[in-house]
Image: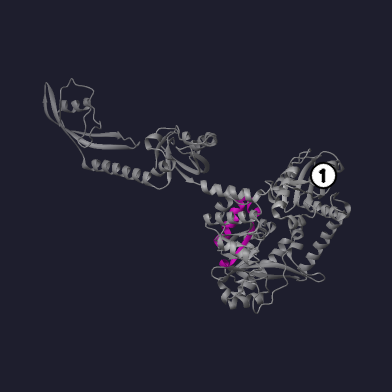
Amino acid sequence: MSRKPRQERGSMVRPPMESGKKIIAPSLLWMVIGAAALALLSTLQKLHLGVSLHWSGYLLPLLVGAGGGLAMYRFFLRERRQFAALVQSEERYRTLYRKTPVMLHSIDRLGRIIEVSDHWLTVLGYGRDEVIGRPLVDFFCDDSRRLAAEVLPRFYSVGNVHDIPYCFVRKDGSQIEVLLSAVSERDNRGSFRRSLAVAIDVTEYNAKAREIERLAFFDVLTGLPNRFLFKRLFDQSLAAAGEGRGLALVLLDLDRFKGINENHGHQEGDALLQAVAERLRSTEVAALVVARLAGDEFALLFELPGESRDLEPTVRALLDAVARPVNFGPRDLKTTASAGIACFPQDGGDASTLLRHADSALATAKATGRNTFSFFSREIQQQAQAQQRLEGALRRALDNDEFFLAYQPQIDSDAARIVGVEALLRWNHPELGIIGPGRFIEVAEESGLIVPIGAWVLRQACTTAAGWQQGRAGGVRLAVNFSPHQFKQPDFVANIEAVLAETGLDPRCLEVELTEGIVMENTEATLMTLADLKVMGVHLAVDDFGTGYSSLSYLKHFPFDRVKIAQEFVRDIPGDSDSAAIVVAILGMAASLGLAVVAEGVENAEQLAFLRQHGCREMQGFCFAPPLSPEDFQRLLASDTFAAAGRFAGCAPLPPDRA
């Protein structure tokens, strides 16, 4: 009830359950008392959350006099319950928001923090009163502040962002890397009111990714780009080369370096390689790129503004620099080098061709007498003609059914059983005998013949594996490699689906192996293709992992099941520290992403022990079995036993072909 003199102004009547909320104006109250009649009221209250609440009730005048009046007001119970429920819902939401074990934050239209989760505060080391009301960018590193200046206007306009890489600065000054995604809350007019953002800590993942990138793209011993990075930089230089601008590729190989290692030890051999690398880096004519391709082989890329012969003094200076003695305490160690040169555009228009031609020229230089160099010549061009003849022979091989498949088991070394098998292509040449794919697959790829050859491989492998499904092989994966040309075909998925239907092979028994380069060329189209394959039930694997783009973000976004460690890394473990570091890093990243791993090319007990010690269970290689005929593989599978030395009772392995 209320009793007030008519002259009093400025205060508001408070409903009994509101405790301080002001709803009814005094002027309205005295109008009702003066009329001496029951009044029904409806008023709108705006709450602090931006929610409007309608109240309904009545005012009843009880006493009216010259000096004042008396009135009773009452609001309906339904509205009181509505308000109480809203308050309770708000509290539940706030509790859930703060206690969720992820980094959540909300900002207003000015970018100021209006709420954060407890986990957000814990990770960054701040108290709630230290962050509320401050701009979010206050907690970013400098690079992230610049990025936010670009992203926030778009976020306010569009209303959402996904996986934006930011870097938060903790209270102690350390930094964490996050992927931030956010959505916005809008009012009835569509204006931005507040955000809800979640930040995922990817600091450890990014550190592993950078380490793998460093190991996979740079030579640990010399710090130079390795073969994979050089190939990428070479491609970029070729793409940037305009009309009239030439490039020269120099392949340089140390002479008799193997003898140095054998006579003086690997420690001095490594020191010699480091000295050579430094001398190549500091040549008078700066190279665009200096790389260590493998062992004692280096590559240098030069601009060539004039004739190719103009490069001769530079190459001779390189060989002279390498030939200078390297001091090792009490003695000097001396070596020489040979070089092969191929020039763009006259000797080839792409990196693969130029590398091949430079390598041919290098072989000519070494045959000439070492400590010299040779340019790619017309005589060497005859090798290209030989490749053309090879292409014709491949076409005839398809027509004459000269190809066949061998099957190499993939072993679970812990369970001592076969869990998969890879189909490997072989060519039974009528004159040269059995030829491995290393001798012809590049020509098949360049000519486009890889598409029909690959289609034959898929159909043949699935037909054979379907015959095994009735027995023990029903649960064994069949791994089939696919080339870039095949993957780019518009009917790639449809062809796989048709072959599976035709042969009756369970899609869950097929594993599609793709190289890193394939999946990085067109990520959106690639993701759609891989998603279609996953819907079919097919397994997906990255073949020769670490030899291409080293993968990094695509492993997170693409639906791969397995990575295969390239045999060129496995081959040199555990003795080669670089290869060992790469293998360990790949195993660690795969484990963090929940991916299975198969190590290729396991050939001895030392490699087997190293891989098992670092958590790799599945392996493939001559340590367990060579590539086998279908019949021999089926017998091996039925026996369910194998020997660690790689020789199997009752099996007649095909002639080993490690090409």
The residue that mark 1 highlights is 320
Residue lying at the far bottom in this picture: please name it: 650
Vertical placement of 16 versus 652: above or below? above
Say which amino acid is labelled 1.
Asp
Measured as percent of width and height from the top left, residue 110 is found at: 45, 32
Residue lying at the far front in this picture: please name it: 330
Measured as percent of width and height from the top left, residue 69 is found at: 13, 26
Range of residues picked out in magenta: 507-535
Pick the residue in front: 61 or 363.
363
Q: State the quadrant of the C terminus.
A: bottom right
**Secondary-structure class at tag 1:** helix
The residue depicted at 69 percent of the width and 51 percent of the height is 228
Judged left or right of residue 501, residue 59 is left
Measured as percent of width and height from the top left, residue 584 is found at: 58, 56
Vertical placement of 430 versus 280: above or below? below
Q: How many marks?
A: 1
Measured as percent of width and height from the top left, residue 57 is found at: 21, 36
The residue depicted at 82 percent of the width and 71 percent of the height is 431
Vertical placement of 44 versus 202: above or below? above
